[in-house]
Image (cartoon, grey):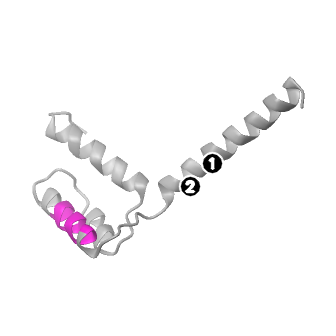
Amino acid sequence: MNEMDLAFWQEIIEVKQIEEAENDMTRKLEFEHDWQWDQLSTALDGLYHKGLFGDYNWAEKASKREITAADALFLSTVILARQNGVDV
């Protein structure tokens, strides 16, 4: 395999890895234990009632076990920002 072929296949592999990472972000979270879902649901309920986010659907999604990695990242970022005085 020459350098050009190698570069082509490396590019294909990198694109596939990016696509897989994007798919991971939209996949629903998977926890080993039920208590982890319960704790996440309770935490989001409490954070909603403290005003750290404004849409109760996030807590409902957790109680239905429908939160994705992208959802969790978004919520974590917004909550952290608000706890540190950032107006988002």
Q: Give the class, few, some or many, for how many residues have Cα within 10 Å of label 2's Cα (few <14, many ≥20).
A: few
Residue 22, above or below 15: below
Please name whichever residue, 63 or 12, is drawn nearer the observer in this view of the structure.
12
- The amino acid sitting under disc 2 is Asn
Q: Which residues are magenta?
A: 36-45
Quarter of the image for residue 15 reads: top right
Extreme residue in the top direction? 3
Residue 32, above or below 22: below
The circle drawn on residue 23 is 2
Is the stretch drawn in magenta largely helix, strand or loop?
helix
Q: Which residue is mark 1?
A: 19
Q: Give the class, few, some or many, for how many residues have Cα within 10 Å of label 1's Cα (few <14, many ≥20).
A: few
Assign the N terminus to one quadrant of the image: top right
Q: Secondary structure at mark 2?
A: helix
Residue 54, above or below 32: above
Extreme residue in the right direction? 2
- The amino acid sitting under disc 1 is Glu
